[in-house]
Structures are given as C-alpha cells and as structure tokens.
Amino acid sequence: MSQSNLWSIAVEALRTLSDEYLPVIDTEEINQGVDPGGWGLLFSAYTFDPDFVSASRLRVRNPYTAEKVFEDRLAALASAGLLDSNGFGEYWLSGRGKDAVAHIMAAAYERMADLQPLLLADLERLASLLHRVVQSCMSAPEPPGKWCIGYSRRSDPGEKANLIVRIDQYLTDLNAYRDDAHLAAWQTYGFSALTWEILTLLWRGEANRIDGLLDRLARRGYPGEVYVEVLNDLVERGLAQEDGEIFRLTQAGLDLRQRAEDTTDRSFFAPWECLSPAEQEKLRELLIRFQHTLAVGK
C-alpha cells in the first residue's frame, strides 16, 4: 500500500464526513444568512484569534485568490456587524461574529455526534492513529513550515470532544499540512500563484483553453487578460505549447510540475513514518470502513 493511496482514502473520508454536516450549517436558520464563503472567512478569523485576520494573511494559505476579493469579503462581513475593523484592513470577530461561529460549530458538532460509522473501539483507534500523525507533522523539521496546520490546530476541540468531531479535526489538520507541503514545494520556483494554478490545471488536463480557464478560475478575481499573459509566459518559458486555441504542457512543463508533486509527497508523508507499516495498514482499513459506512448511510 502506498502512502499516496492512504492519503487519497483519507481525503475521501473527510469529504464524505463533511457532506454530513455542511448541509446542516448551510441553512439560513444556522448561518444567519451568511454564505459559505462568508462563514469560511469567519471561521478563519476564529482560528486567528486573538490575532487579526486580513487579506494578506488569508493569502498565505490561499495565494491563488486576488487580494481584493478577500478585502471586499472582509469589508462586507464588517458591514454586516460580524467583524470589527481598525480601518487599516485588519479585522477581528465582533461579539455577534463570535456568536455566529459558535452557533455554526455547535450545529456541525451536533450532527457529527449523531453519527456512528464504526464501533467505539474502532473510532478510538482511528482517532488515536490520526492524532499521532498530526503530532508528528507539528514536530517535523522545516521545510515545510507550519502556517496552515498551525492555525488549523487552533480549532481543536480537545480530547474530551466527540470522537467523530476529533477525527474531523485531525483530517482537517492533515489537509492543512498538505497545503504547507505543496506551498513550500512550488514557491521555490518563483512563479506567481496564478501561473502555478494554471500550470496545474494544464497538468491535470482539467482545462486547456482560455475560456475553460476563465470558467474554472472566475472566483479568483483576476481580469481575463491576465490569463492570456500567463499562458503566453508559459509558452515563452518552454513549459507550454499552443495549438490553435488549445494549450498543453511540454515535456519540460510536465517534468517541472511532477517534481513539485514529488517534493510535496516527500515532505507531507515524512511525518507518517511515526506509524509502523502495520499501523498504516490499520489506518487504511479503518478509514475505508469509516467512509463506506457514512456513504451507504446517506
């Protein structure tokens, strides 16, 4: 069993679990009319507390989105009374914002507490194995840094919390560390975040025309002409080639993107060596049963 396969299973388990509670909190009764993007930013403000949240801080983990998009969203939340601002682009949860986050988290936790995808002993074992990997990530040498996982850990509900809630936290922490590892891998090449994201979409074969890229990345907040500039730059660097309206990576582009992925994997999976091969196999088995039972129960 490869570690990459184990992580793919873990990602699917996290996705299936989140599908259980996201619909619950994506209702006006719970989210008080704040859209998913908005309460995502409120939750970020919660993890930064008592430090401030700002567009530049949000872009450390998500450099792919234009700074103005975050600035506008934060300002809108402040106008709604959910954030307080010092007038210089720095925000903190207001009293109302703290209540909103607590309300959303309580609803998510309540939903997870109703789930029983494994026997209690198996849930305890799963939580214990994941927690060990998370702790190993936190103590791993740098690079990668710990920005993403460090702030993710701030929302840890503690060892007395419901086991499903703890499993959700640990899987979320590991997903954050994956971001730490990938950011460290590609940023050494000196590309802009938008260039790297477009290169990645070409590498995955998810979009190879300008209109397709515009559709996929509209939420990032960049004007259309920027995409043309990025594609032309990739062609000039010899990393992509243009065939009519279609762009494809050259072998040099494919090799570069694969090197970054390999570096990401090496950094991300190094802390997983805290588990023996038998323990990794047990983790795989538990995650598969966990995910399958949740999926079947829908």
Image (cartoon, rainbow, N blue to C red):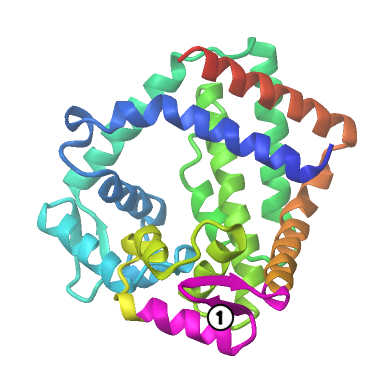
Front-most of residues 260 and 230: 230
Residue at the limit of the structure toward the bottom, as seen here: 236
Residue occupying the point 67% across, 19% down: 289
Indicate the secondary structure of the residue bearing disc 1. Answer: loop
Q: Residue furthest front?
A: 244
Residue at the far top: name it.
Answer: 119
- Residue at 53% across / 72% down in the picture? 247
Q: Is residue 143 among what the camera can see?
A: no
Q: What are the residue bounds of the magenta stretch?
A: 226-253
Left or right: residue 91 versus residue 275 is: left
Q: Specify whether 86 is left or right of 247.
A: left
Number of numbered markers: 1
The local crowd at label 1, few if under 14, some if 14 to 19, many if 20 or more residues have their Cα within 10 Å, is few
Amino acid type indicated by mark 1: Phe
| Residue 86 falls left or right of residue 113 | left
Q: Quadrant of the C terminus?
A: top left
Residue that numbered label 1 is attached to: 191
Is any part of residue 5 visible from this angle? yes
Please name whichever residue, 47 or 12, is drawn nearer the observer in this view of the structure: 12
Where's residue 296, x and y in %? 53, 14
Q: Is residue 112 above or below residue 59?
A: above
Which residue does the image show at 35% across and 50% down from the upper left? 46
Magenta run includes residue 244: yes
- Residue 210 belongs to the span the image colors magenta: no
